[in-house]
Image (tube, rainbow, N blue to C red):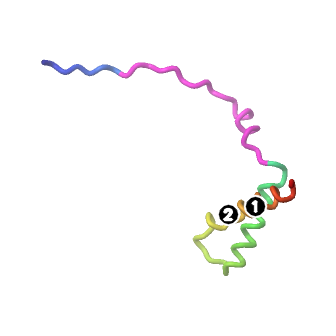
Amino acid sequence: MRATVKSASKSKAAPIRSASASRRRSEAPEGLWERISSKAYELWEQRGRLEGNALRDWLDAEEIVMEEIHEARE
C-alpha cells in the first residue's frame, strides 16, 4: 500500500483590518499610560531602584492604577 500526501488546502484568510481601526480599539483612556508609568517609577524607587524588575514594577503599577480608577467610579 502506498501512502499519499495530501496538500494543505487553502483556507480563507481573515480580512485585513486597517491600522487605524485596530489602533482605535487598543487605545487606553486619556492619561492612563502616563499614570501607570509614573506609578511604576515610584515603585522602582521604593524598591531601591533594583534593575531587572521593570515588568514586575509595571504590572504592579497597572494593578494599582486600575484599582484607583475602579474605586473612583464607585
Residue holding disc 2: 58
Residue extending farthest to the front is: 74
* 36 and 73: which is toward the camera: 73
Q: Residue 73 carries which label?
A: none
Cβ atoms at labels 1 and 2 below 8 Å apart: yes
Crowd class of label 1 (few under 14; some 14 to 19; many from 20; radius 10 Å): many
Please tell me which residue is depicted at 60% across the width and 74% down the height of the picture: 51
- Point out residue 33 in the picture as x, y percentages from the top left corner: 77, 56
Left-right relation of 2 to 63:
left
Q: Of helix, strand and loop, which mostly describes the magenta segment?
A: loop
Q: Mark 1 points at which residue?
A: 36
Residue 6 x, y percent position in the rendering: 30, 20
Front position in the image: 14 or 74: 74
Label 1, secondary structure: give it.
helix
Quarter that holds the C terminus:
bottom right
How many other residues sit within 10 Å of disc 2, few (<14), some (14-19) or many (≥20)? some
Identified at 23% across, 19% down, the residue is 4
Q: Residue at x 37, y 22 (%)?
A: 8
Task: Look at 86% across and 54% down and name the residue there.
Answer: 73
Which residue, as the protein is rendered here, is positioned at the far bottom?
Answer: 48
**Left or right placement of residue 9 versus residue 25 in this view:** left
Q: What residue type is labelled 1?
A: Ile
Measured as percent of width and height from the top left, residue 62 is found at 71, 60
Location of residue 26 (image quadrant): top right
Quadrant the N terminus occupies:
top left
The part of the image, by quadrant, that contains residue 69 is bottom right
Q: Does the magenta stretch include residue 11?
A: yes
Q: What element carries label 2?
A: helix
| Residues drawn in magenta | 8-28
